[in-house]
Every structure is written in C-alpha cells, then in structure tokens.
Amino acid sequence: MSDENSPEAGAPADAGQGETTPETAPAALQAALTQAQEEAAQLRAELEAARQAELTDQERALEDAKAEARRSALAELGTELVKAELRAQGAAAGVDVADVEYLNLSAFTGEDGRPDAERIGDYIGKQKTKGRPEFADLDGVGTFPSRGPAVSSMDPTELADMITDGRFL
C-alpha cells in the first residue's frame, strides 16, 4: 500500500505545477482572492438577472419606482452630504472650507450619488498645500507717544528754529 503522492513513490505531487514558496505565497493568495471576487460578482449579476426575469410587470414597476426614489433622494441630499464631508475632512486637516457654496459639489459625488471621499481628500490636500501666507512679526509697529516737544504752531520760522536747535527730530 503505497501512496502515489508520497515522496517514496517518485516525484512530488507539485512537480511542474509551479510550486508555492513563502516568497510567492502572498502573490498567489492575492491572485486567488481576486479571481474569487470576480466569480462572486459574476454570480451575483447572474442571480439578479434571474430574479429580474421572474418578476411580474407590477413587481418590476415597483422595483423601478424604488430605484428612482432612491436616486432622487440621493440627488437632493447628495450636495448636503458632500458639504458635510468637505467640512469634516477640512477640519481634520486644518483647512478652512467655508466657501463650499461656490464649489461645483456634483464634482465630488460618485456615480451612486454619494460623496466620493477620495476626490474630496484630493481637494482638501490641494487646499492644504496652498496654505495661507505667513506674515513677519511686526514688532514695534503701532502708535507711540511723541518723544519730542509738542508743536504748538505751524509757523515756518518757529519750525525752522526747532529743527536747527535739534528739538524737532
């Protein structure tokens, strides 16, 4: 009683099959996962198509009305959701986004009418890099009391005397 896959019977079972080593295991697993996800999506689409084929005209009209109501509700509330997402991401990044009323908010929605967080994040990132200019500290700027004598008149001879005596400047 010998096992055909045992090493004593000859070549290993994986010979020529593209052996999986610890270095190639993550890539192989990722490829298998991707393939399984594609198959699952295809099966979901087939199931939905079969379900749609079995619907009566009334049920189909009801499903269409539900889908239209969902789209219309998202269209109305989508801009408010985008504004909220812009403010939330802006606050987290320290960017003031008070002028969202002037933006084309539909550019930040996905195909399903919901906010696209990636597009909003890109916009916030661009606003953050623009930044605001840093102004130098203005030490010594402001109003100070006069250090010289008060000028009581604007008589040119009196002003000339004050300048020559060094009391004016």
Image (cartoon, rainbow, N blue to C red):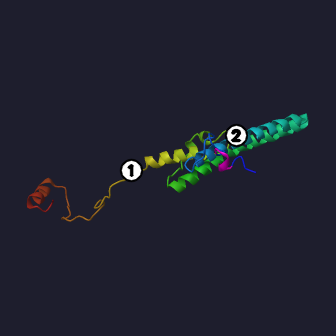
Give residue 34's position: percent from left, percent from top: 65, 43
Q: Does the magenta stretch include residue 9?
A: yes
Q: On the image, which quarter does residue 164 sit in?
A: bottom left
Question: Mark 1 or mark 2, which is nearer the start of the sequence?
Answer: 2
Place residue 37 in its image quadrant.
Answer: top right
Identify the residue at image location x=11%, y=55%.
Answer: 160
Q: Residue at x 60, y 50 (%)?
A: 85
Q: Residue 111 lies in what quarter of the image?
A: top right
Judge whether residue 96 is colored magenta: no
Local SS, label 1: loop
What's the residue type where badge 1 is placed? Pro
Residue 120 image point, x, y percent: 57, 46
Q: Residue at x 65, y 45 (%)?
A: 10
Quadrant in the picture for the C terminus: bottom left
Nearest-to-viewer mark from 2 and 1: 2
Give the mark count: 2
In the rendered structure, the answer to whether residue 138 lies left or right of residue 74 reads: left
**Seen in the image, is 160 located left or right of residue 49?**
left
The part of the chain drawn in magenta is: 6-11
Q: Nearer the viewer, residue 22 or 70?
A: 22
Q: Residue 38 carries which label?
A: 2
Q: Is the residue 150 above or below the residue 73 in the image?
A: below
Front residue (pair 20, 64): 20
Check disc 2 and report its element: helix, strand or loop. helix
In the figure, 42 relative to 93: above or below?
above
Q: Residue at x 51, y 52 (%)?
A: 96
Which amino acid type corresponds to the residue marked 2 in the rendered image?
Answer: Glu
- Return the x and y of residue 113 as percentages of the image width and height: 68, 42
Circles 2, 1 touching at the beta carbon (< 8 Å) = no
* Distance between the alpha carbons at the discs numbered 2 and 1: 50 Å
Q: Residue 133 carries which label?
A: 1
Residue 145 locus on image (x, y percent): 26, 65
